[in-house]
Image (cartoon, helix red, strand yellow):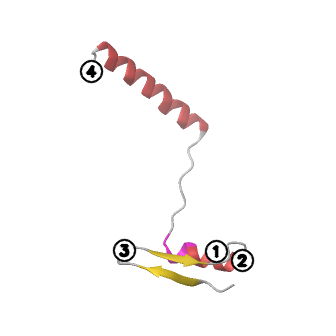
């Protein structure tokens, strides 16, 4: 299967390709300039969760 540009609009388009082919998948990711998402550590998620709980509690109590 070849990679083809199926639709091309003003600001978006559709690439049709074989996702099993690593070369085509890599090229598609490069073409759309996709960025890897950062993964948060469990420690950081726990710290943010604790901060959110404290902020909500302060809001409910009217303490800003």
Sequence-wise, which precedes: disc 3 or disc 1? 3
Q: Are marks 1 and 2 in contact (CB under 8 Å)?
A: yes
Residue shown at 28%/16% (left/top)?
63
Q: Residues within 10 Å of mark 4 (few under 14, many from 20)?
A: few
Give the alpha-carbon distance from disc 1 to disc 2, as whole Å.
6 Å
Decide: is 28 above or below 53. below
Q: Residues within 10 Å of mark 1 (few under 14, many from 20)?
A: some
Mark 2 or mark 4: which is in front?
Answer: 2
Decide: is 49 above or below 18. above
Does dot 4 land on a helix, a strand or a loop? loop
Within the magenta stretch, is there residue 53? no
- Residue designated by label 2: 21
Within the magenta stretch, is there residue 32? yes
Sequence-wise, which precedes: disc 3 or disc 4? 3
Tell me which corner region of the image, top left, top right, bottom left or bottom right, holds residue 8. Answer: bottom left
Q: Position of residue 30 (x, y in %)?
A: 54, 75
- Residue designated by label 1: 25
- Magenta residues, start to end: 29-33
The quarter of the image holding the C terminus is top left
Give the alpha-carbon distance from disc 3 to disc 1, as whole Å.
21 Å
Mark 1 or mark 4: which is in front?
Answer: 1
Does dot 3 land on a helix, a strand or a loop? loop
Residue shown at 35%/78% (left/top)?
10
Q: Which mark is residue 11?
A: 3
Q: Residues within 10 Å of mark 3 (few under 14, many from 20)?
A: few
């Amino acid at each position: 299967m070849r990679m083809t540009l199926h639709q091309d609009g003003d600001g978006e388009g559709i690439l049709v390709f074989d996702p099993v082919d690593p070369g085509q998948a890599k090229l598609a990711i490069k073409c759309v300039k996709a960025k890897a998402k950062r993964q948060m550590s469990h420690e950081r998620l726990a710290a943010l969760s604790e901060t959110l709980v404290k902020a909500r509690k302060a809001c409910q109590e009217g303490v800003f």
